[in-house]
Amino acid sequence: MRDLQILQRGFEDYTQTFDAMRAFTDTRDATTPDQLWLVEHPSVFTLGLGADIAHIIDARDIPVVQTDRGGEVTYHGPGQAIVYLLCDLRREGRACLPREFVRRIEEAVIETLAAYTLAGVRKPGAPGIYVGHGPYSGAKIAALGLKIRASGCTYHGVSLNVAMDLQAFSWINPCGYQGLQTIDMRTLGVDLVLTDAQQILAQQLEKQLRARHESR
């Protein structure tokens, strides 16, 4: 596997990060190391390419940003661990299937939750990770959305709810699902410093990406 760089960008406005991801991808070449960007955003609703604006029930005073990722509407805000994956899926000589790439991302979230004895599960046809059992079974705890260019280069990524004010999720239909409950790790009994959660998630992503390459 080529070098993978992990960059902590801190607390950053979403549009600043979005512009930076596209600029990085525009200028990268075959020698550019893949990067994971660790970010926390102020409150923002983001729309995927196929998003229906009607799924924003009441934006209040929260900005709404149209993006070029897949998926529907989601919310980013303080207390959410976000990792953006700026990767070249073709650099090992044959394209990595996008479905496998998504599976690896989801597995990294599941392993991160398992480190704190939380069960995360997938739902067929609904990207992201959900609580596996208990009173919050079925609630969504992590979302993902990607842009994969024709060149095989990716950006956008995954968000894990760590210690958030979850009210803003009730002002939208999260990921286009009316009444979908969202949850965070704190509500499930895990108090975790956000930067620690970001690092653990990044380490699990790195592990999964290395496993993808080593399995070839």
Image (cartoon, rainbow, N blue to C red):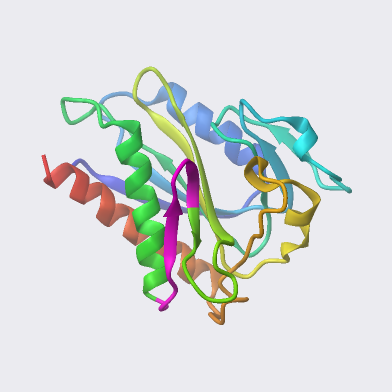
Q: Please determine whether, in this image, residue 151 is positioned above or below residue 181.
A: above
Residue placed at 47% from the left, 68% from the top? 197
Quarter assignment of residue 68: top right
* Magenta-drawn segment: 116-128
Quarter assignment of residue 102: top left
Q: Find residue 29 and report its horizontal and vertical position in percent.
A: 32, 23
Q: Is residue 150 magenta?
A: no
Query: Considering depth in this image, is 54 or 204 the residue closer to the camera?
Result: 54
Residue 81 seen from this side: no
Residue placed at 68% from the left, 56% from the top? 77
Q: Find residue 40 and report its horizontal and vertical position in percent.
A: 60, 56
Q: Find residue 168 and report its horizontal and vertical position in percent.
A: 77, 56
Residue 95 seen from this side: yes
Query: Considering depth in this image, is 14 or 127 the residue closer to the camera?
Result: 127
Q: Please determine whether, in this image, residue 99 is positioned above or below residue 199.
A: above
Residue placed at 54% from the left, 75% from the top? 193
Q: Please determine whether, in this image, residue 209 is positioned above or below residue 199.
A: above
Q: Is residue 17 left or right of residue 156?
A: right
Q: Is residue 119 magenta?
A: yes
